[in-house]
Image: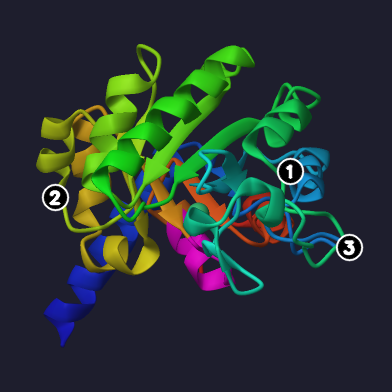
């Protein structure tokens, strides 16, 4: 038991060092925008604006492509019984969100983003039903980022390995593409050319040594979707780079007062 306690104390000390080394500066990303704010909705234009209004580092959003190849911002890929990929934009973009807005096109989203120049854009390309469509999506998303002059403000994330490779192919030079599915070890991510891992917190808690391994390989660590206090403190203790949360202001408050390793 004594040995176990010593090991646990050493682990806590190492976590503290990791947190201090990171200067407690874990950057906060609003998951699907700051939609938990009153009057907002997931992936709405309002949620993007609200993420900026409270000082988030970035705002995450999800992108699908309609049957007539229009990029739209939505999470589920199904809206009011319509499959986004099998339905034209005219119908999809007429569907209402919970705050009364209609489903935005990526173009509308980027127009709003131009009004918030300090906000980083974390663009999740959803996994399409065909590889061909996924390739087309990646190309069109990257072209639109270029058209709006947003290339330097956008990072890409995806659950699809092919999607990741397509984004790397079409995005601007130096673009950061993160992988979301936690089934690659750090060395594999490096091999693919990813900017880092954007994995669920349970994966990093299972393999906490990956945080250091990823950093040692010159990559970054983003953790999703961390909404509870214990998880937020874990992220600070372990020196991750980014936290993706539905409650960005909750995290900001914790980060202000929490001393790493003291929970
Ligand atoms: Mg997402």
Q: Secondary structure at mark 1?
A: helix
In the rendered structure, which disc, 1 or 3, sits on the residue that comes first in sequence? 3
- Mark 2 vs ligand 1: CB under 8 Å? no
| Magenta-drawn segment | 225-235
Q: Position of residue 137 (x, y in %)?
A: 42, 36
Instruction: Determine the residue positioned at 60% across, 45% down.
Output: 72
Q: Is residue 238 visible?
A: yes
* Disc 2 from disc 3: Cα separation: 40 Å
Q: Nearer the viewer, mark 2 or mark 1?
A: 1
Relative to residue 201, is residue 62 drawn left or right?
A: right
Relative to residue 124, is residue 247 drawn left or right?
A: right
Instruction: Determine the residue positioned at 18% across, 42% down.
Output: 213
Relative to residue 134, is residue 76 drawn left or right?
A: right
On residue 185, the disc is: 2
Q: Secondary structure at mark 3?
A: loop
* Dominant secondary-structure state across the stretch colored magenta: helix
75 vs 46: above or below: below
* Disc 1 from disc 3: Cα separation: 13 Å
**Colouring of the image:** rainbow
Kindly identify which residue carries mark 1. 48
In the rendered structure, which disc, 2 or 3, sits on the residue that comes first in sequence? 3
Q: How many marks?
A: 3
Label 1, residues with CA under 10 Å away: few <14, some 14-19, many ≥20: many
- Mark 3 vs ligand 1: CB under 8 Å? no
Label 3, residues with CA under 10 Å away: few <14, some 14-19, many ≥20: few
């Amino acid at each position: 038991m004594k040995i176990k306690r010593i090991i646990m104390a050493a682990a806590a000390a190492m976590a503290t060092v990791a947190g201090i080394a990171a200067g407690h500066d874990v950057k906060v990303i609003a998951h699907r925008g700051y939609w938990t704010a009153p009057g907002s909705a997931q992936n709405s234009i309002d949620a993007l604006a609200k993420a900026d209004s409270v000082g988030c580092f970035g705002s995450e959003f999800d992108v699908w492509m309609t049957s007539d190849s229009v990029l739209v911002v939505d999470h589920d890929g199904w809206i009011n019984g319509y499959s986004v990929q099998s339905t034209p934009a005219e119908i999809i973009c007429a569907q209402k969100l919970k705050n009364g807005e209609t489903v935005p096109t990526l173009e509308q989203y980027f127009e709003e983003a131009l009004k918030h120049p300090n906000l980083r854009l974390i663009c999740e390309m959803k996994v399409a039903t065909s590889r061909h469509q996924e390739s087309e999506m990646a190309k069109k998303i990257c072209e639109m980022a270029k058209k709006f002059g947003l290339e330097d403000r956008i990072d890409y994330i995806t659950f699809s390995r092919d999607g990741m490779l397509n984004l790397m192919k079409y995005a601007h030079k130096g673009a950061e593409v993160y992988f979301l599915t936690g089934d690659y070890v750090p060395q594999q991510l490096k091999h693919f050319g990813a900017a880092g891992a954007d994995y669920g917190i349970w994966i990093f808690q299972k393999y906490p040594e990956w945080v250091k391994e990823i950093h040692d390989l010159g990559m970054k660590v983003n953790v999703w979707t961390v909404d509870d206090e214990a998880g937020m403190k874990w992220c600070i203790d372990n020196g991750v780079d980014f936290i993706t949360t539905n409650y960005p202001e909750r995290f900001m408050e914790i980060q202000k007062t929490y001393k790493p390793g003291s929970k």
